[in-house]
Image (tube, rainbow, N blue to C red):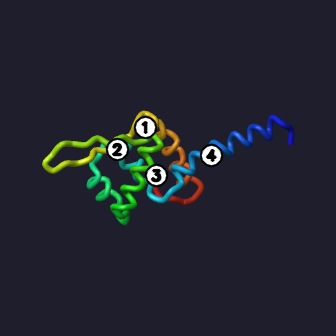
Amino acid sequence: MDEDCRSAAIRCDEALTSVFSVLGKRWTGVVIGVLLERPARFAEIARAIPGITESMLSARLTELKAAGLVTREVIEGPPIASLYRLTPSGEALRPALEALGDWAQAHLGVPV
């Protein structure tokens, strides 16, 4: 393998490793999918994702916030609530996630 190919492979590996360290965790894609529809409160996200625990949802939202993909806005109450929305970086995932969904339908037999 020549040096250009080796460098390209290393860059690709680093990029994919970085992406999947965030997006490859269980529930992360589903949380992003909910927020691609519209900003939502914590309880709304939890209701939209059957099977996710509140602690897991909290962990995923915290990770997405740390990655710069989600913002959290505190809404004064009563009751006090948190509204989550995608940042421009999070929103920029839309075409890639849609393409992955299309690929899964075409190649993994995922139903439409």
Which residue is identified by label 3? 29
Report x, y in % for residue 82.
26, 47
Would residue 38 appear left or right of 16 to someone viewing this image?
A: left
Which residue is identified by label 4? 16
Q: Which mark is residue 37?
A: 2
Mark nearer the viewer, 2 or 1 = 1
Residue 45 vs 70, above or below: the answer is: below
Amino acid type, label 4? Leu
Report x, y in % for residue 88.
42, 33
Amino acid type, label 2? Glu
Which residue is identified by label 1? 91
Q: Earlier along the polypeptide chain: callout 4 or callout 3?
A: 4
The front one of 18 and 37 is: 18
Say few, some or many: other residues with alpha carbon within 10 Å of mark 3 (under 14 / 14 to 19 / 20 or more): some
Say few, some or many: other residues with alpha carbon within 10 Å of mark 2 (under 14 / 14 to 19 / 20 or more): few
Q: Earlier along the polypeptide chain: callout 4 or callout 2?
A: 4
Mark nearer the viewer, 3 or 2 = 3
C-alpha distance separating marks 3 and 2:
13 Å
